[in-house]
Amino acid sequence: MENLAGSLEVASGVFHNVTWTFMFDTQRYTPLACWQVESDRFWILGNACKLGLENIRRLCNKNYVWYVDAYLILIVDDQPKRDSIELSYSIHAMGKANCKLFSWASKPKEFSPEQDHEHFDKNVNANTFLANIKVFAKDMLTLRCEIIFGENPPPLPECHLPNQLRMLMDEKYTDVTVVVGERQIRAHKVVLAAHSPVFDAMFRSDMQESSQNVIEIDDFDYEVVQEMMTYIYSDSSPKIENLVCSLLRAADKYELGRLKALCEQTLCDKVSVDTAVEYQALAVLYNAAQLQRIAAAFIADNIFNVQKTDDWQRMVQMFSLSYICQKDKQNVEHDDKEDRDLFKIKSI
């Protein structure tokens, strides 16, 4: 198996979309040889994943035939997950003009990389696949994967950092100050950078955070920032129930994947007639795919009761106002055009 970095793009919504583009060596990856390539890691709901592509030989009608398969892997610390997760996914080999040339798709199932990855009913013949490789742009192959989880969200990844809350409380060896309004929190760059790619980028750049060792946060209350720091240092959030919406926003901004998954799981358990519309909006704003799916399903199943809530009425009014404003704008533009045309006629 060979790891090919290439480029990875991950977008979250109702579906999780992953695009992997890499150099495909046609001299090396031939139709009558066994080969296997995998992407770098990417993260979905706090779970490490990879995409793979392989050429394998299978017995078909008493003859061996070579097939190309694409697949998804779940990984935790270089080991397969012990817990199965219900999900389905489809992978497409993309050609020029962003068209789908070949596709592989799985049915919803309890999925775990402890088992061999699923062999699909529909396989791609290696000769057919490689005969069309010239239509891929500039010898680059792009695989696009769409992932959707089942009704139960995937288990949260385990925390492997030791409990460092005492370091935060004692302010021992602190080297950065987090300023929230008129209050301050002393912290450690290495701890913040280890948890958050956003903090890591701050400290690596020429920004104020690196040169002056100060991080100013003005879009969250002190209590929310303090709870985020408590989570970073202890992997626990005692006040998550009361601050969950703000913590979800903070976790999304600072790319704290596990905290975001904790917040999403907490909100999924709290979906009700009174909260469904609000949580659906939060899910869309902060790419919380599991919450978006559960809230949408709840609204569909309880639509008559949800329509009686104030949140629903505000949503209807907001979108109705947006629609009216758009129509008014179109009417004004239409009237202006008629006036200009009439002016031209009179001028003639």
Image (cartoon, rainbow, N blue to C red):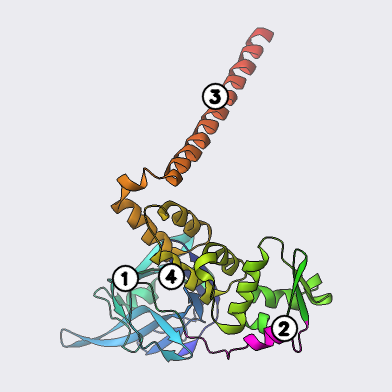
Q: Is residue 196 visible?
A: no
For disc 2, the neighbor class at 10 Å (few under 14, some 14 to 19, many from 20) is some
Query: In the rendered structure, which disc, 1 or 3, sits on the residue that comes first in sequence?
Result: 1
Question: Circle 4 is placed at which residue position?
Answer: 265
Residue 215 as seen in the image, left or right of residue 197: right
Query: In the rendered structure, which disc, 4 or 2, sits on the residue that comes first in sequence?
Result: 2
Residue 138 as seen in the image, left or right of residue 267: right
Which residue is at a point 42% across and 60% down the rendered structure image? Answer: 292
Q: Which residues are magenta?
A: 158-175
Say the numbered circle drawn on residue 105.
1
Q: Name the residue type under label 3.
A: Asn
Which residue is at a point 49% across and 79% down the rendered structure image? Answer: 24
Please determine whether, in this image, residue 276 is positioned above or below residue 225: above
Secondary structure that dominates the magenta span = loop
Q: Which image quarter: residue 269? A: bottom left
Question: Circle 3 is placed at which residue position?
Answer: 331
Q: Please provide percent x and percent y for residue 107.
A: 27, 71
Residue 169 belongs to the span the image colors magenta: yes
Q: Which image quarter: residue 336? A: top right
Q: Nearer the viewer, mark 1 or mark 3?
A: 3
Q: Which one is in front, 6 or 226?
A: 226
Residue at disc 3, secondary structure: helix
